[in-house]
Amino acid sequence: MAAPLLTVTDAVKTFGQMRAVDGASFEVAEGSITGLIGPNGAGKSTLFGAVAGETTLTSGRVTFAGEEIAERSATEIYARGLSRTFQIPRPFPKMTVLENVMLAATDQLGERFWNTWFRPGAVARQEREIRDRAHEVIAFCNLTAVERNLAGAISGGQKKLLELARVLMSDPKLILLDEPAAGVNPALLDTLVEKIVELNTRGKTFLIIEHNMDMVMSLCDPIIVLAQGKVICAGAPEEVAGNRAVIDAYLGEVVA
Ligand SMILES: Nc1ncnc2c1ncn2[C@@H]1O[C@H](COP(=O)(O)OP(=O)(O)OP(=O)(O)O)[C@@H](O)[C@H]1O
């Protein structure tokens, strides 16, 4: 069997006395759409932040594409092909959809971009390439009709598609989606799911945090369940749905 694309081993993240992530271990197989679920406060977003390099784990290991990344910066991890979206989309509201998508590419070019200031011909060529790629990605995400609109003025669902478009500019191997369905109307949710499936067919691997159980159960396999910072179950949707510890964790949330 192929080595996993992402491996998290004994991850711990504490905030003062609080163990937000408490010894979590799991794998994401290359080519999978893996779900990460769990009650509120289980530690899912904290784990995402640690995997993407925004925060450092208190202890534990993270391996991505065969390389240890727990100590790497977010920029280095992004450059290696791991990109994420946020629970609440963070576009630049006063810029157009097209500008937002193009900016995702200039972010990633970093120093190389600034170097080109000394070579004006190269700047123009690079800008053309970025614009062409942005148009492709925007069309794929069904956003062409609004590409000249201000990002702050498009719908919640379109903002989620914009997040996906920005992520796609870097052509990542692994895409982390943080609650893609939150605040998205059913029609746009179908589009979003369709796009995820299509990208997966083209070889992209996904790790998805989601509270919408219908979406998770139909889209993700395997599903990893986190509760109080620990993985309490991981398996196929039907296994997870019938697991006693999972049911108890969610019931605990309802009762609490
Ligand atoms: N920067 C921080 N400082 C202190 N506590 C934090 C911090 N970030 C997260 N926490 C706490 O860590 C725990 C895990 O939070 P986290 O956001 O990772 O959970 P989650 O599973 O993503 O929850 P949700 O589904 O509600 O988004 C929570 O109790 C939260 O209050």
Image: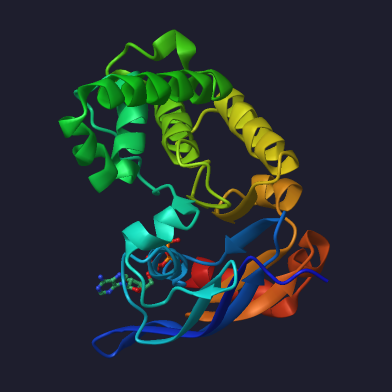
Residue at the image position 43 percent from the left and 24 percent from the top: 134
| 105 on left or right of 95 | right
246, above or below 78, in the image: below
Residue at the image position 45 percent from the left and 36 percent from the top: 169
46, above or below 145, in the image: below
Residue at the image position 70 percent from the left and 64 percent from the top: 29
151, above or below 171, in the image: above
Q: Observer-nearest residue: 10 or 73?
A: 73
| 109 on left or right of 31 | left
Is residue 151 in view? Answer: no
Residue 133: percent from left, percent from top: 47, 24
Residue 123: percent from left, percent from top: 26, 25
Residue at the image position 41 percent from the left and 23 percent from the top: 129
Residue 67: percent from left, percent from top: 53, 73
Residue 160: percent from left, percent from top: 45, 34
Where, quadrant-wise, is the N terminus in this rendering?
bottom right
Is residue 163 in view? Answer: yes
Q: Observer-nearest residue: 101 or 228?
A: 101
Q: Observer-nearest residue: 221 or 104?
A: 104
Q: Which quadrant does ligand 1 occupy?
A: bottom left
Q: Which image quarter: residue 127?
A: top left
Q: Which image quarter: residue 238?
A: bottom right
| 160 on left or right of 199 | left
Where, quadrant-wise, is the C terminus in this rendering?
bottom left
